[in-house]
Image (cartoon, rainbow, N blue to C red):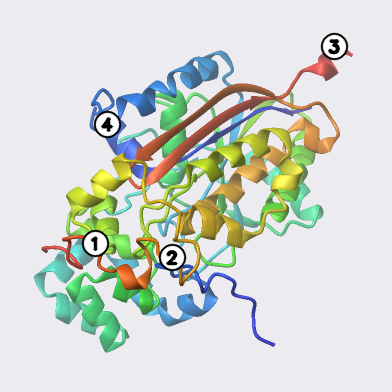
């Protein structure tokens, strides 16, 4: 018997379920370590060396180094944990959110001021809303951010 | 006997706390939002309770992936505002009410809700932003607060139905407490928002307002809405709204009493990535009259 996972057909969305949490356990625990100032300093001094102290997979480490949050989420990361990386870099939650959409920070902010992203066409994979895979990237932004 | 007199519902967007802490509330971006809470602060000043039972979620602050309690009640004497990575908010420490918290834990567990009892934890923006919105900047929060943390991050989260029933059990617990305390119950989080993936920034104004309508008028039916609808229609992080159903389940009408009075209602888009919703519901004091 397989589990009921009715959320797998939502476009542009990864639900952090028990399976994702298993896959991302060490990635998320690495992120938690950045709650401590001395760990943030060690990470910033040599990111690769700090990551190598953790049993992360190589794709997880590459996603962190590139600040590619979509990839990190695919590898089991959860946004509230990954946000510790952004905090370490002095980034806001909005900047992190924008980085996952392909919108620049200004484009993303404008979208929110216009009332946010519409639900129309974004409920189910196969529709034609702006969050659908065939419409990525959405703007002039790039994955990740300067750090 | 203690009683629950009112419930407050509000989003807990972290940037709202930042705007207050940095003195930006008069900026054009923020003014409409804080204007929507002016009536709330007047109401709260006139209706300050003895204790606030505050339902919120921890955002990978006190709880990492090492331990993930579905429902956790804070029974400590005090809780420190957490450093979430940007530095701790400059807000007062939160004074708890260990005796009432322990009493509620005991009663609710006997009622088949298997709470995790937490005697040590820091509290993040999920708890402190609602206090700031309702109380403004202050050197001390006006009353003790019992933190009640719900897992809405690690899926599956508790269902709306389970949350509503838990609220009913919390009301029964409060009414069994033999001190004459006036308790408010606050449900926080939401409304529509998604913080992850290419669908980040989703807002569903119609869905949110229907949720507010139904929370007022038909909460038991609203509690039957399945998790998938929150996530699909209002964004992956909108599932936080199940926490509002705990507070709503603690109102008198969920125990056969009268419908609450709507003291205030407000909705605003955007605050950062999020739609902000807010309600204040007062129980009618018919039992005093009779």
- Name the residue tied to disc 3: B289
Q: Check contact, mark 1 vs mark 2: CB within 8 A.
A: no
Q: CA distance from mark 2 to mark 4?
A: 33 Å
- Name the residue tied to disc 4: B29
- Name the residue tied to disc 1: A99
Q: CA distance from mark 3 to mark 4?
A: 45 Å
- Pinpoint residue A125: horizontal percent, then vertical percent: 47, 71
The residue marked by circle 1 belongs to what chain?
Answer: A
- Name the residue tied to disc 2: B64
* Dot in front, 2 or 4: 4
The residue marked by circle 4 belongs to what chain?
Answer: B
Q: CA distance from mark 3 to mark 2?
A: 49 Å
Q: Check contact, mark 4 vs mark 1: CB within 8 A.
A: no
Residue under disc 1 on the same chain as residue under disc 2? no
SS label for mark 1: helix
* Dot in front, 1 or 2: 1
Q: Check contact, mark 3 vs mark 4: CB within 8 A.
A: no
The part of the image, by quadrant, that contains residue B199 is: bottom left
* Dot in front, 3 or 2: 3
Residue under disc 3 on the same chain as residue under disc 2? yes
Residue shown at 43%/48% (left/top)? B203
Residue density around tag 2, few if under 14, some if 14–19, many if 20 or more, within 10 Å: some
Classify the position of the C terminus of chain B by image quarter. Answer: top right
Q: CA distance from mark 3 to mark 1?
A: 58 Å
SS label for mark 2: loop
């Amino acid at each position: 018997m397989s589990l009921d996972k009715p959320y797998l057909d939502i476009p542009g969305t990864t639900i952090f379920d028990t399976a994702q949490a298993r896959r991302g356990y060490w990635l998320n625990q690495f992120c938690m370590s950045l709650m401590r100032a001395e760990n943030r300093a060690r990470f910033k001094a040599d990111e690769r060396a700090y990551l190598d102290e953790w049993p992360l997979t190589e794709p997880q480490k590459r996603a962190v180094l590139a600040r590619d949050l979509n990839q990190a989420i695919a590898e089991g990361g959860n946004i509230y944990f990954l946000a510790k990386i952004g905090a370490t870099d002095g980034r806001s939650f909005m900047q992190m959110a924008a980085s996952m959409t392909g919108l620049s920070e200004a484009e993303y902010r404008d979208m929110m001021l216009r009332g946010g992203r519409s639900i129309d066409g974004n409920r189910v994979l196969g529709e034609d809303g702006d969050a659908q895979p065939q419409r990525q990237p959405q703007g002039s932004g790039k994955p990740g951010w300067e750090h | 006997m203690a009683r629950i007199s009112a419930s407050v519902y509000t989003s807990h967007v972290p940037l709202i706390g930042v705007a207050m802490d940095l003195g930006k509330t008069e900026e054009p971006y923020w003014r409409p939002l804080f204007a929507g809470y002016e009536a709330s602060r007047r109401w709260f000043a006139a209706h300050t309770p003895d204790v606030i039972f505050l339902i919120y979620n921890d955002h990978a602050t006190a709880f990492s992936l090492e331990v993930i309690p579905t429902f956790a009640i804070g029974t400590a004497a005090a809780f420190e505002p957490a450093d979430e990575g940007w530095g701790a908010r400059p807000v007062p420490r939160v004074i708890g009410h260990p005796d009432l918290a322990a009493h509620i834990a005991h009663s609710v567990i006997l009622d088949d809700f298997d709470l995790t009892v937490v005697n040590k934890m820091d509290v993040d923006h999920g708890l402190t932003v609602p206090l700031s919105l309702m109380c403004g900047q202050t050197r001390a929060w006006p009353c003790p607060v019992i933190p009640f943390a719900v897992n809405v991050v690690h899926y599956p989260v508790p269902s709306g139905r389970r949350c509503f029933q838990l609220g009913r059990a919390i009301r029964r617990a409060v009414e069994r407490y033999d001190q004459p305390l006036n308790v408010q119950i606050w449900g926080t989080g939401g409304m529509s928002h998604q913080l992850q993936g290419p669908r980040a920034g989703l807002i569903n104004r119609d869905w949110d307002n229907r949720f507010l309508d139904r929370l007022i008028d038909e909460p038991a039916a609203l509690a039957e809405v399945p998790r998938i609808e929150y996530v699909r229609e209002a964004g992956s992080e909108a599932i936080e709204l199940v926490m509002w159903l705990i507070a709503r389940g603690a109102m008198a009408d969920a125990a056969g009493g009268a419908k609450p009075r709507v003291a205030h209602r407000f909705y605003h888009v955007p605050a950062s990535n999020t739609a902000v919703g807010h309600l204040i519901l007062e129980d009618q004091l018919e039992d005093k009259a009779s």
